[in-house]
Image: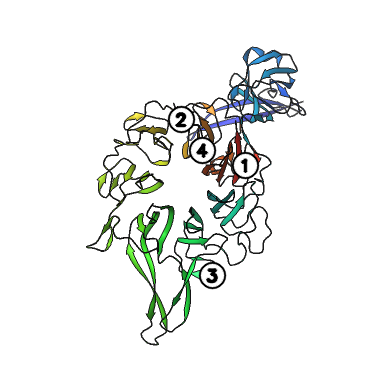
Amino acid sequence: MKRTIYVCILLGSLLAACTKETVNSNAQGPYGDPVLPAINFAEESAIIPAKGKVGDEVVLKGKGFLAVKDNLKVLFNGTAAPIIKVTDSTITVTVPELGSSGSVSAQIGQEFYFGPYFPVFGPFQMDTIFPSVRGGNGGIFNVIPVPGNKYMIGGEFSEYDNSAIAGGVNRFARINADGTLDRTYAYGTNTGPSGPIYPMVYMADELQYLVGGNFSGYDQVSNVYSIAKVNANGGVSQRSVSRPSGAVTPASALEGGFRGTVAGLFVQSDKKIIAIGGFRYYVRPNYNLTTVESGVDSLHLDSTMVQNIARLHPDGTLDSSYHYDLVNHQGKVTVNGSISSYYMLADDKMLIAGNFTTYGGQSIGRIARLNTDGSLDVSFNPGAGPDQAISDFAVQPDGKIICAGNFKKFSGVNTGGIVRLNADGSMDATFNAGEGADGYVNRLGLIPGGNIIVAGSFRKFGGVTRSNFVVLTPTGAVHKTYNTNGGVTFAGNAPLGQVWKVLPMTGQNALLMIGSFSQFDYRQANRIVRFTYQ
């Protein structure tokens, strides 16, 4: 028995045609039988062994392989593998150079068949003993080494290492070298800043930490604006202020702070403090006031306009000798855009980069060096600079500067979003990252010995499949043995898995990496991971 279906096509208001199609009573459509896949991977034990390293021989199991062997490719996370032997039910291959953890797939012409997950191991490897799974429950934005083989971490987390401490671990913590929480530091209710922490400096001569971020209070002390000194074992460093009434109020040890975000902090050789960030005002609480009518204690924030960069005396008062207009009592004009990266050189000069084209009204190509008084150092000349923003830079031990961002050209030269400059700002022609990332690079890290970590939001780098993370050689090429890992992700969403900092661990062939990611190499790593390398 057959049924008849009439398909009518209406063009405008005219009936153009009617066609007659037949459908079998067994419900098969008019377009023929369904297309079956050319090959199938086995549902269980599809790859033997289940893990390996570059150069290992592995066997894929399934069916239909022999019929397509002349058009067959096997890919390890997008990198083609040498095929040794094909039967109808097996494909024998070797794990390819630049192959990495991820899906093993087959390509037949323009068709792709996704097979099993296969972890690839190499000489640059995630430390699975380090408690990355426990990690932090929010972004970790900075990490610095401190005495006792320990590390301070800061960010926006409220818990770390599943501490179960009443009140949690609020945005600032000290951890042991093995990644566990150092419980000799003060945590819990009513501790820590009221907002996230970004920069941190250990002040060895004072046995204190200098921290910055975006907060208005610290512990139970009010009017602590985005910069504070913190005692070695916890608690904001404070002083007692006598009010007109005779009452005594706890206040920050620093006289003032900033309205806005402090993203970078540096202590010069003379103990003065340079702050960089997204702020427009330096504020200093005035506790010596009373109300007019009742005469009770009052407080006012004395504000001075400063833009993005300012210097403080060691006591936290504003240093008016640093890029300051004494006539108008305000900071001089700095950049006309955002600053995303900063670094203090050995001579106390400052490198800054970001998305700005002027400093103090003078044209500059998104990266500049400042003199010790905050003026522009015109001896640093990057030419026209990049055509888009610089997201990050890293200063090598030899003084050369690696810059990365979403730019396509630097001083008119085509680049892949990453270049190296000489100490005077000129381009270093010995560095070439080729086509670079197919997305954006926003973080750089240096491995002792010269290799370079590049992180961001990209699927490929230099044509090699890399999930937001790649290791380069000192000349900019994709490292052939340090890229077997599956990269960085955040709960399966790769673009959200951002890296904030990579820090070499003293005396070890190891690195700490922190950020807002929750996975590395497809393993859970809550905002912190330790690498080992050979």
Counting from the top left corner in percent of width and height, residue 255 is at 40, 67
Q: Which mark is residue 220?
A: 3
Name the amino acid type tagged 4: Ala
Calculate the distance from the C-alpha at mark 4 to the C-alpha at mark 1. 14 Å
Q: Which mark is residue 519?
A: 1
Q: Which mark is residue 455?
A: 4
The secondary structure type at the circle numbered 1 is strand
In the displayed structure image, the side of residue 218 where residue 184 appears, left or right: right
| N-term-proximal mark, 2 vs 3 | 3
Calculate the distance from the C-alpha at mark 2 to the C-alpha at mark 3. 48 Å
Query: Which residue is drawn at the image coordinates 34% and 62% (left, top)?
Result: 318
Counting from the top left corner in percent of width and height, residue 160 is at 63, 54
| N-term-proximal mark, 3 vs 4 | 3
Name the amino acid type tagged 1: Gln
Location of mark 2 (residue): 436
Estimate how packed mark 4 is, as few (under 14), some (14 to 19) or many (20 or more) residues with alpha carbons within 10 Å.
many
Calculate the distance from the C-alpha at mark 2 to the C-alpha at mark 4. 12 Å
Establish if 466 lies above or below 283.
above
